[in-house]
Image (tube, rainbow, N blue to C red):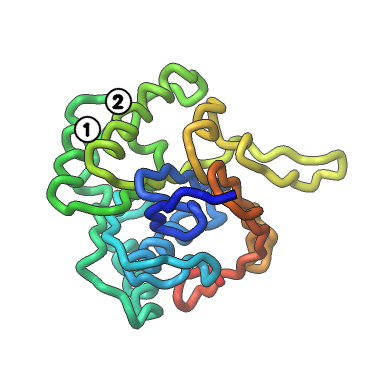
Amino acid sequence: QDFPVRNDIIENAILPTLGRMMVGAAKGVGKTTILTQMMHELASGEPVLGLFDVPKPVRVMMLQKEVDSESFSRRLEQVSQHYARLQPDNILVVNREDIIDLKLDTPQGVQLLTQCIVYFKPDVVMLDPIAWFHNLDEDKSVEVKKLLAPLDKMILQFHVAMVISHHFGKTQHDNRGHPIDQNLQSLRGSSVWGDWCDTAIWMNDRGNDKALMNMFMRNGRDEPPTVVLTRDRRNNIFE
């Protein structure tokens, strides 16, 4: 069967133009780490996680509310030194101190994100983590749909791909007290989160700086891999 030609940002429709990606994990497992790494690899045109080809360098705008700007700047310095082909002009980071009032359930917040996109003209927009970009009830599907609607509009209006991170809900344990691996359905709140994305990446902690990464691909041609990632703390990336 012949497939139509796509303009993939990451090969195999992992992140197509106009694509929607979700990155999920429990707190502290490495959502921000993997997003920051992905941002540098996309901006450099290097394979994401060393696994997935990036046909050409693209412009990436990351809005992060996870850590303060000083801490995030140190993280960026660590990561950027690892990528010799990095094109710095392809990266724009907007830190939480500058977007305190950016809430996607308000007209002002939607307008602010729109202005950021118009200014930088990114190919990819990252929001980390989505929980800090709204004041809605994540358990109510109608409210989550209301939150995601302006993102879908921006995807079409500005021809961007959207990548958001989200936390897992409370960890479940088996009868021996061991944590049970979580998956796409473990994202905190409504099932709409998982329904929204074209591609999902989620991680489970394996201890000793290791995480098990799984993927779901709605439009991919190949079976997505399951990979054990190891955190390189010197460069603040996964390998």
Residue 213 to residue 55: above or below: above
Q: Quadrant of residue 176?
A: top right
Residue 107 to residue 221: above or below: above
Residue 156 to residue 55: above or below: above
Numbered disc 2: secondary structure: loop
Q: Looking at the image, which is closer to me, 25 or 3? A: 3
Q: Which residue is drawn at 36% across and 38% down?
A: 132
The kind of residue tagged 2 is Asp
Q: Find the distance from the CA under tag 2 to the CA under tag 1.
A: 7 Å
Neighbourhood count class around disc 2 (C-alpha, 10 Å): few under 14, some 14–19, many 20 upward? some
Where is residue 168? Give x, y as percent. Answer: 57, 40
Q: Residue at x 65, y 62 (%)?
A: 227
Where is residue 236? Give x, y as percent. Answer: 46, 70
Q: Mark 1 points at which residue?
A: 109
The kind of residue tagged 1 is Gly
Q: Residue at x 42, y 62 (%)?
A: 38
Where is residue 230? Give x, y as percent. Answer: 61, 70
Residue 65 visible in the shown view: no
Q: Is residue 152 left or right of residue 21?
A: left
Where is residue 171? Give x, y as percent. Answer: 67, 40
In contact (CB < 8 Å): disc 2 and disc 1: yes
Q: Which mark is residue 238?
A: none
Residue 132 visible in the shown view: yes
Numbered disc 1: secondary structure: helix
Locate the C terminus and report the quarter of the image it occupies: bottom right
Q: Which mark is residue 105?
A: 2
Please state the total of marks drawn on the protein image: 2
Extreme residue toward the bottom, this view: 84
